[in-house]
Amino acid sequence: MCSDHDSTDFTCEAVSGCGEKAPGRHVFLPATAETVHWGYFSKNLAPKAEVRSGDYATIEVLTHHANDDSERMVEGDPGAESVFRWTKDEKAVARRGAGAGEDGEGLVVHICTGPVYVHGAEPGDVLEMRILDVRPRPAGLSKFAGKTFGSNAAANWGYHYNDLLTEPKPREVITIYEIDAAGGRNWAEAVYNYRWVPQTDPFGKSHPTIDYPGLPVDHATIDKNFDVLKGVRVPIRPHFGVIAVAPAEADMVNSIPPGYFGGSIDNWRIGKGGTVYLPVSVKGALFSVGDSHASRGDAELCGTAIECSLTGTFQFILHKQSDLAGTPLEGLDYPLLETANDWVIHGFSYPNYLEQLGTERSSEVFTTSTIDAAMRDAFRKMRRFLMVTRNLSEDEAISLRSVGVDFGFSQVVDGNVGVHAIVRNDIFPV
């Protein structure tokens, strides 16, 4: 599962037997059928790597939309071929989703790499993940050398789906984008799009809509439109839509609705140079990362970003509960993001839907979440952040929230609506 890196600064530590090393060492965790979990988080998952506070990990992440164009995003890539292998006889990754059946019932989409066990992490601690680097995963076939590709799905779960103007209505549309694998160009451009038509999976089941993760699309059945978004350059901002530690409330948790543990936060600011802080609720934290994106806009309106496989390098810093008093991390019960310029607070319709709804009713998060509730949660969290970390009075915090804090939609498509609040760190005295 791991391999040593040729560096005097890094050596490998992982479950596969590389042995325990001092902090500051480096783990490499590839994405394979053995190292990913698809569509769920679980406190019962066996770790795929281990780190200590101060250690680094380079982790490969595959997009669950790679089979929208397998030639560009799966073929010739051994890791992707391993994960997406699906024949009439077997699926390489059988469980896709958090459903009660052995196969997960295919209701949840994200491919997550991990989990990573953090030595010493206990409930009540805070785990800090510094995102040191994010790189596009190159296409596997030589004819696409130097290129990376991603897929955007205007899908049935998108905000737009029941509010279309033109025929046919309804419809789902896939757009394939091209990115420079070396990072020399800082934009993505559309290659072609196509309307979804019913697809038959290798087990013989028909899928009239995009309703199952990793469906292989038979390109003989689609009509490609190459005359799409001509001359448009989409600035890329590679990031991870899913970054999470394992929740404590249930054995199997859907990867779509975000919560206090992270999950599908879907904030494009969770990229290179960002630092994410998450409250730990199970021993070892069990960190996972997935849902990699080349770019997206706030709200992720049509259902997805430019879903694109990436490789990230992280540093893990563990903050023990006994050391949190008087720090900005004291009492942290939500995903907190720090960038070079900002603090970003994440609010949700349900701050902890697993507890508020109960595990038996957790699916109600998809039907009862509201933008208003998410906004109120973000406002309350920002109020506390300003009062506790900047020692402002409530009246000062209220004024500053209105004149110096930006609120925006992280996403409106993941069940638990997300609103983020951003305050610049340079507005405060040094």
Image (spheres, grey):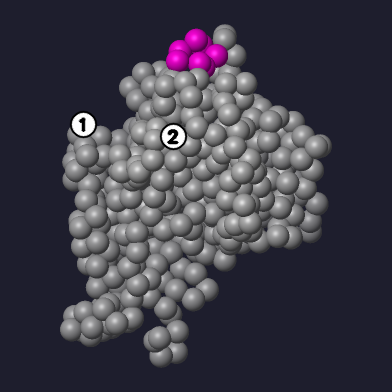
- Is 336 magenta? The answer is no
Dominant secondary structure (helix, strand or loop) of the stretch shown in magenta: loop
Q: Quadrant of residue 30?
A: top right
* Residue 2 seen in render: yes
The quarter of the image holding the N terminus is: top right
Q: Dot 1: within a 10 Å radius of its alpha carbon, few (fewer than 14), some, or many (20 or more) residues?
A: few
Asked if 375 appears above or below 6 in the picture, the reply is below
Relative to 425, is 379 on the left or the right? left
In percent of width and height, residue 345 lies at 35, 65
Q: Disc 2 on helix, strand or loop?
A: loop
User: What segment is highlighted magenta in the picture?
Assistant: 200-206
What's the amino acid at mark 1?
Answer: Glu
Q: Residue at x 35, y 42 (%)?
A: 164
Total numbered labels placed on residues in the image: 2
The location of residue 53, given as percent across then percent down, is 54, 58
Dot label at residue 4: none
- The residue located at (61%, 44%) in the rendering is 227
Q: Residue under label 1, please give it.
A: 360
Toward the viewer: 287 or 193?
193
Q: Is residue 412 left or right of residue 78?
A: left
Asked if residue 303 is positioned above or below residue 104 in the image, the reply reads: below
Left or right of 282? Residue 360 is left
Mark 2–mark 1 CB contact (< 8 Å)? no
Q: Is residue 261 above or below residue 376?
A: above
Q: Say whether disc 2 or disc 1 marks the residue closer to the N-terminus.
A: 2
Q: Is 232 or 138 nearer to us in this picture? A: 232
Q: Is residue 41 left or right of residue 72?
A: left
- From the image, tell me which residue sits under label 2: 172
Separation (CA) of disc 2 from disc 1: 31 Å
Kind of residue at badge 2: Glu
Determine whether the residue tagged by mark 1 lies in a helix, strand or loop.
helix
